[in-house]
Image (spheres, rainbow, N blue to C red):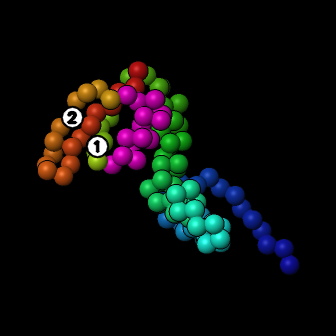
Amino acid sequence: MKRAVTLRRAVSADCKQLWAMQKTAFAPLLERYRDYDLNPACEPCERVAERLAQPAILAAEQIHGAEHWALSTILQETGNCYLYEKTGYHRTGRTDTVNAHMTLVYYEKD
């Protein structure tokens, strides 16, 4: 009996399911080689979410234009900072301390 397979573009709501599938798929290699630094089974869910977010950012820029974007994110969330820098944003130098645990960092893309 054949099973029908449907392919669709992943969205952010799929992140946890994709992460679980990734962990399951790479668990045997992790167990065999114990490469905790490189194996995708050890990758945090946030990294999977970044890979889903990057195309969304670029798609928004295609629709609305890629010039003169500005945004802020939480400085302590290094994955967010990495994502924006990878998509061409640069820090403006402005930061705002929200509290002892959180600082906003500002980005621009020209």
Which label's residue is closer to the chain start, 1 or 2?
Answer: 1
Residue 74 in view of the camera: yes
| Residue at the limit of the structure toward the right, as seen here | 1
Question: Picture coordinates of residue 74 (x, y %)?
Answer: 28, 45
Query: At x 28% / y 43%, what residue is drawn?
Result: 75
Question: Picture coordinates of residue 9 (x, y %)?
Answer: 62, 52
| Residue at the limit of the structure toward the left, as seen here | 99
- How many C-alpha atoms fall within 10 Å of the one at disc 1: few (<14), some, or many (≥20)? some
Q: Relative to residue 72, is residue 24 depicted above or below? A: below
Report which quarter residue 90 is drawn in: top left
Question: Which residue occupies the foreground of this view, 4 or 95?
Answer: 95
Question: Picture coordinates of residue 59 (x, y %)?
Answer: 53, 37
Q: Secondary structure at mark 2?
A: strand
The residues tagged by marks 1 and 2 sit, at their Cα atoms, a distance apart of: 8 Å
Query: Is there a contact, CB below 8 Å, between mark 1 and mark 2?
Result: yes
Is 47 magenta? The answer is no
Query: At x 48% / y 53%, what residue is drawn?
Result: 47
Query: At x 25% / y 27%, what residue is drawn?
Result: 93
Main secondary-structure element of the magenta-colored stretch: helix
Q: Relative to residue 1, is residue 84 depicted above or below? A: above
- How many C-alpha atoms fall within 10 Å of the one at disc 2: few (<14), some, or many (≥20)? some
Report which quarter residue 30 is drawn in: bottom right
Which residue, given by chain and number where applicable, does mark 2 sit on? 95
Q: Secondary structure at mark 1?
A: loop
Q: Quadrant of the N terminus?
A: bottom right
Residue 21 in view of the camera: no
Which residue, given by chain and number where applicable, does mark 1 sit on? 75
In the image: residue 2, left or right of residue 49: right
**Which portion, as a residue range, is magenta?**
77-90
